[in-house]
Image (cartoon, rainbow, N blue to C red):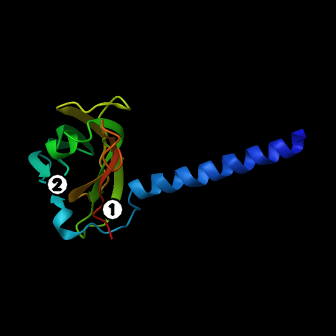
Amino acid sequence: MNIPQLTKILYVVLWCSVVFLSGCATYLKPETGAIARQEARINLTEKSVKEDLWKTKDLQLAYSITRSDDTFTFQGELVFDQSLTYSFGTIARFSLKMSFLDGEGRVLETVDITPMYKAFGSVTARMSIRASGAEPAGAAAIAFNYFGLFKGDNNEIGGSDWQIFYFPFE
């Protein structure tokens, strides 16, 4: 095999990798203008602190959002459900996003609020989250979405991976 053929093969592999990985990134982030389902919308209060608990079958997130002027500060504590962590105690990948919504539930902007974790490390009991930034004009509500891949300790039981996800957008 000569150098030009090897270069062509390398470019094809690189191109396929970029296409594949960008597809995953799009799935995790709702497009601007996408509509959040009614039950997923969490209304924001007028420029004050909002404290709440958000739960799904996979996790619970206790959080507070402080809004002032055109900025927000998000603080939270994430706990994965024990039914997940007892069987699949290793975190391979996890991503958590928060979308700001307008009054009609349309996505204005999405921010990454994924907690820090060690890839392929044990799931910790509680994960702290801190994020801040500019809040989009007209934000009236928020919605969360996530994707995660967990690995089990016992490879003999019908597969050792488990995916979790929540994506409440149309």
Measured from the top left, where is residue 12 in percent x and y?
72, 51
Q: Write the residue at 20% across / 62% down.
A: 40
Count every numbered label the image shows and give the total.
2
- Most extreme residue toward the front is 156
Q: Residue 50 carries which label?
A: none
Mark 2 or mark 1, which is nearer to you?
2
Q: Residue at label 2?
A: 57
> Which quadrant: the N terminus?
top right
User: In front: 35, or 163?
Assistant: 163
User: In front: 138, or 54?
Assistant: 54
> Which quadrant: the C terminus?
bottom left
Q: Left or right: 34 with respect to 138?
A: right
Q: Write the residue at 61% across / 48% down.
A: 17
Bin the neighbour count of mark 2 within 10 Å (Cα to Cα): few under 14, some 14-19, many 20 and up: few
Residue type of the residue flagged with mark 2: Lys
Secondary structure of the residue carrying tag 1 is: strand
Measured from the top left, where is residue 38 in percent x and y?
19, 69
Q: Which mark is residue 107?
A: 1
